Amino acid sequence: MGAHRSPDLETVAFHRSLALLRSVTDNSFRANYVKRLIVVFAQSSPPEVITSRLTLDEYRAMEETNPERHEYRNGEIITMSGGSESHSAIASNFLIYLGFLLRDTDFRLYNSDLRVWIPEYQCGTYTDLMVINGEPEFNGDHNDEILNPMLIVEVLSPSTEAYDRGDKFRKYRSLASFIAY
């Protein structure tokens, strides 16, 4: 009879954290729970598409000095909308809560300062929060582009909900490390 190997404690802790997150809601926000997806809506202005196309190197140089954030979609540059008070509060609460749940583990929690790079789609985008297991995998020598998120948290707004639930979620699923959204 083969030896039964139990999941490591950190993996169990991570999945328990996800279960707890799914069970938490604040009645002042409209929330929707769909299988492995937690969605909380907050108001913000719609994203603005910059019509000029940039090379990836031009985009990265621009992001280093620009006070606004932009998503890179295979040459197209999209200005990320400014967050609302509600958006900031929700993201901050998730950051604090996840930080507490994941303390003393190998899971690392990151806020929206780092991009997720999605090689299959030549897409660099900012998440509200992401969790990785162990060491971050960077995109080459770009220490601001993560390749290995396992959990991604997005605080949705009516203006970005369709993209976040659709194309962006499809792109995230192309990442081998990705588990939950």
Image (spheres, rainbow, N blue to C red):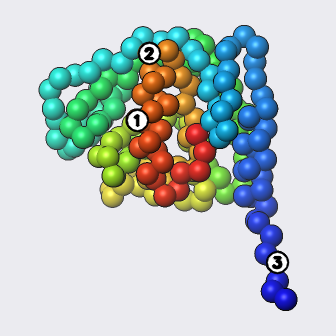
Q: Is residue 90 left or right of residue 165?
A: right
- Name the amino acid, label 2: Ser
Q: Which mark is residue 167?
A: 1
| Quadrant assignment for the C terminus | top right
Among the two numbered marks 3 and 2 on one chain, the one whose residue lies closer to the N terminus = 3
Q: CA distance from mark 2 to mark 1?
A: 14 Å
Crowding around mark 1 (Cα neighbors within 10 Å: few <14, some 14 to 19, many 20+) is: few
The answer to which quarter of the image holds residue 87 is top right
> Can residue 70 be spotted in the picture?
yes
> Which of marks 1 and 2 precedes in the sequence?
2
* Residue pointed to by mark 2: 159
Which amino acid type is shown beneath numbered disc 3?
Answer: His
SS under mark 3 = loop
What element does badge 2 sit on?
loop
Q: Quadrant of residue 25?
A: top right
Q: Nearer the viewer, residue 27 or 162?
A: 162
Residue appearing at x 59%, y 18% in the figure = 41
Q: Which mark is residue 92?
A: none
Label 3 sits on residue: 4
Chain-order first, disc 1 or disc 3: 3
Residue 53 position in % (x across, y down): 15, 32
Q: CA distance from mark 1 to mark 3?
A: 40 Å
- The amino acid beneath tag 1 is Asp
